[in-house]
Image (cartoon, helix red, strand yellow):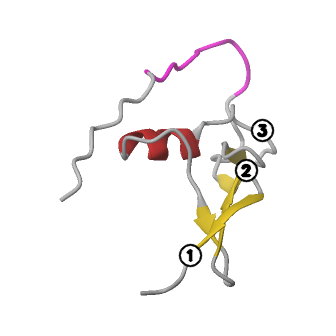
Amino acid sequence: MISVMPLTNQPQVVEIAPGNAATAPLSIKSVAFDGVGNLIVTLSDDTVLDPVPCAQQIAAAFGGVALVVVDENGNLLANGKQIGKVAAS
């Protein structure tokens, strides 16, 4: 059994400023990871939210510092570089 520590989120801030009301509700246009594991969210008005270090937070939840992946050939990759090979058991 893996023990997982709960993640904490940063408090959110809402700014109220003079100006016109939005003409349409905002929605999420896209969600993607950049080359270093940050989650990048773009809204329907093309606003890009601050990057979230998602890969680091997931790794930390499992007691690690980075995520690694295995490609379809069994190559173990970290930061885009092969660091080993795995075999199905």
SS class of the residue under badge 1? loop
Amino acid of disc 2: Asn
Q: Residue at x 51, y 19 (%)?
A: 13
Q: Is 36 inside the magenta-drawn segment?
A: no
Q: Residues within 10 Å of mark 1 (few under 14, many from 20)?
A: few
Query: At 76% from the left edge and 48% from the top edge, which residue is drawn?
Result: 34
Horizontal and vertical percent position of residue 18: 69, 12
User: Residue tagged by mark 1?
Assistant: 86
Q: Nearer the viewer, residue 29 or 84?
A: 84
Q: Would residue 5 appear left or right of 70 to someone viewing this image?
A: left
Q: Is residue 30 above or below residue 16?
A: below
Question: Of callouts 1 and 3, which one flags the residue occurring earlier in the amino acid sequence?
Answer: 3
- The secondary element bearing badge 2 is classed as loop
The residue to which callout 2 is attached is: 79
| Magenta stretch contains residue 12 | yes
Q: Position of residue 44 (x, y in %)?
A: 74, 51
**Which mark, residue 47?**
3
Quarter occupied by residue 48: top right
**Residue kind at label 1, given as amino acid type:** Val
Q: CA distance from mark 1 to mark 3?
A: 41 Å
* Between marks 1 and 3 in the image, the one whose residue lies nearer the viewer: 1
Q: Is residue 39 left or right of residue 4?
A: right
The 10 Å Cα crowd at callout 2, few under 14, some 14 to 19, many 20 or more, is few
- Percent of width and height locating residue 86: 56, 75
Query: Which sits earlier in the primary sequence, circle 3 or circle 2?
Result: 3
Q: Is residue 86 above or below residue 78?
A: below
Q: Please, what is the three-letter code of the amino acid marked with disc 3?
A: Thr
Residue range corresponding to the magenta coloring: 11-20
